[in-house]
Structure formats: structure tokens, C-alpha cells
Amino acid sequence: AQKVTQAQTEISVVEKEDVTLDCVYETRDTTYYLFWYKQPPSGELVFLIRRNSFDEQNEISGRYSWNFQKSTSSFNFTITASQVVDSAVYFCALSEVSRGSQGNLIFGKGTKLSVKP
Amino acid sequence: GAVVSQHPSWVICKSGTSVKIECRSLDFQATTMFWYRQFPKQSLMLMATSNEGSKATYEQGVEKDKFLINHASLTLSTLTVTSAHPEDSSFYICSASLGDMQGNEQYFGPGTRLTVT
């Protein structure tokens, strides 16, 4: 079973629209970490956010916001007023403490976001 | 800060030859480095976890003798693809972690695109 599910394979929006990227995870650990990364066409992964399992506060950073809900095992990512530069593949990832202190990341399959002008 | 470089950024080699990819943490010491591979339009799959001075831990299904990992110092890890075949063509990405604590952010290199002809 997939531990990190990003059900949306591709999303296309027009500039200035808001868009939410879904992420559902599965773990038996009580302590874990969730991440979002952006991968532009160049290929290099860009870190966006890390959230630990004990911190359910939503976070806002500029046009980006994240909604973490343990009750539904979801960690969704919203881009407000999207821009063409937001076009990229976005990955949600999980790090489980039970796998040791290695910090291994389990990635979802990614959501390709295309923002058209 | 926390920059990770990879060399080469791309390489084309003939089937049967070996290719070495370097991963360096430029401005920090990385206790742990990770190697991922990413096929086109797919997610990142962890290949192995590498700790300085010890043998790498390989994920299930990854051939140790084919993908040789050496983590000789706190700033350098190398991945050697031995006797490469066309099916090894992929995007190889390394990442480095600042410490051995779970949830530490991983800093990703820009990736190396390997094409085996």
C-alpha cells in the first residue's frame, strides 16, 4: 500500500487562480514528519516545508499555505493567486521515526502543476 | 547555506561501462547522505542510505554490487553504476542531512542524468 498518496497526477490552472494539492499519508508511527518539495523542470528539488506530527497548526508563507489534519491523515498544500513560475511537480513526503534515525523520505508520486498565463 | 552539488550533471555512457557520480555537501558536514533515482514522470525512489565511514544501507530490490556507494568523508559520497545497461538510464539525485536526527531536512543535489546507450 502506498504510504504517501497524491491522487492528483496533473492539475492545470490559469494564472491567479488558487489551487490545492492533496496529500494523504499512512503510518503507524506516532512521531513522523511530513514534507513538501517542488521540482521545477530543471530537476532540482526545492524544500518548501517540514511539519512534525505533533504540530497541527496550519502554516502560511506568502502565497503558500499548508493544512495538516491528523484526523484525516492529510497534509494539503494551497497556492493562492498562482503564477506561471509555480509550474512544477510537487512532491509530498513522509519520514517515519520507526525506520530509525536515518530520516528516510518516502515520496508520493507527485502532482504536476501547470499554470497558464 | 546547505548547498549540495553533484557531478556530473549529465553523462552518456556505453553499455557495459561504469559511471561514477559524486555528491558533495559544500558548506556543511553531512553525517548521512541518500541516493535516489527517478524515472521520467515518476517519483523519487530511495536506493540507499549512506553514513560516513560505514557501509551503505540499500533498499530492498537495489543491487549492492551494481550500485556501489562510498561515503569516504563527511562531505563526499559517490555512487558508481557498474556495468551499466540501458535500463539504468535514469535521473540520480543525492541528498545530504545535517544530522542523524529523524526529521532533519534533506538538502538535495541538482541531480545527474545518466543515459546508457
Image (cartoon, coloured by chain):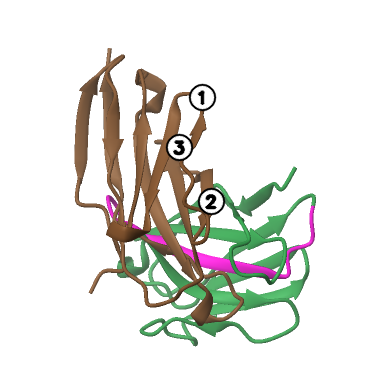
Chain colours: A brown, B green
Whether label 1 touches label 2, CB < 8 Å: no
Q: Is residue B43 in view?
A: yes
Residue A23 percent location from the top left of the image:
30, 51
Type of amino acid at the residue the image marks with label 1: Gly
Is residue A90 placed above or below A25 in the rendered structure?
above
Same chain assignment for discs 3 and 2:
yes
| Residue B42 on the magenta span | yes
Q: Where is residue B24 in the image (x, y as percent from the top left)?
A: 70, 57
Q: Where is residue A7 in the image (x, y as percent from the top left)?
A: 19, 51
Q: Which mark is residue A62?
A: 1
**Helix, strand or loop at mark 2:** strand
Quarter that holds the C terminus of chain A: top left
Left or right placement of residue B57 versus residue A8 in this view: right
* Sooner in the amino-acid sequence: mark 1 or mark 3: 3
Q: What element carries label 3?
A: loop
Secondary element at tag 1: loop
